[in-house]
Image (spheres, rainbow, N blue to C red):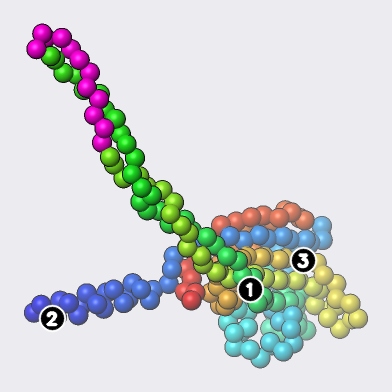
Amino acid sequence: MKFIRFCSLLVIVNLVACSPLQTYLKTDTTAFYTQSFESKGSIVVLSGDINLNNSLEFDAYKQKVQAKLLTEGFSLAVDIGSADYAAMLLYAVDDGKQSVVYTPIYGRTGRIINSYSDIAYNEDGKAVYIRTNHLSPSFGVVGASKQTKTNYRHTLALDIVTADSLNQDQMKKVFEGRTISKGKCSMMVEVFDEMLEAMFTDFLGENGRNRSQTIEATMNCP
């Protein structure tokens, strides 16, 4: 019976150790759009990189963007020919930037003398002060540990253009949104939902202004 309980405890510990970390993602979002643009009309979501249109990863992100656009008042078009707008989606993670973090180590630094005064009485009943010295250990910074960390920059870009301008030499852009975050995750899949949430919070947002947000996140980063 004791063996069964011990194994159960190991299973619980392993599940906790492997579960995603509940944390927060700091983001910065900017939006620029034409004064006449409104979140209505039919729209299709395309990749800003033609090489990603057949990507299963892109297809998963595309469906999430479509769901957000629907909640904002757009309708989904069957194809580009029947759409008013096309949302061009791009995402990227850079190679990371290393930094060195020093953490102080606290420990015993030596001993200090503490003096105390006590009241005593002599044979005549007169009060006298007796000073007593005690040695006690002192603590402080005894060193520092060095740790190298890598922070990655994540970028989520969403441009909305008029559908009929896709066949022209220059697309007519009506909305340009960018959400940027930095952290230890080197995979876009771990931060995409949070960055998309930041981009569509207070959509369209104030034209030409940055808004910083802290988004609750569940990330499983190495």
Q: Residue furthest bottom?
A: 54
> Separation of disc 1 and disc 3 at Cα?
29 Å
Identify the residue position indicated by label 2 in the image: 3
Q: Residues within 10 Å of mark 1 (few under 14, many from 20)?
A: some
Could you tell me if residue 148 is visible in this image?
Answer: yes
82 or 91, which lies in front?
91
Whether residue 129 is in magenta: the answer is yes
Give the distance between the C-alpha atoms of the residues marked 1 and 2, in whole angstroms. Answer: 46 Å
**Cα–Cα span, label 2 and label 3:** 62 Å
Quadrant hosting residue 166:
bottom right
Q: Which residues are magenta?
A: 123-134
Give the image location of residue 48, x and y in percent: 74, 80
Whether residue 195 is visible here, answered yes or no, is no
Query: How would you classify the magenta stretch by its main secondary structure?
Result: strand
Q: Measuring 37% from the left and 53% from the top, which residue is drawn there?
A: 107
Q: Image height check: is 71 above or below 61? A: above
| Residue hosting label 3 | 175
Q: Specify the label residue 96 is tagged with.
A: 1
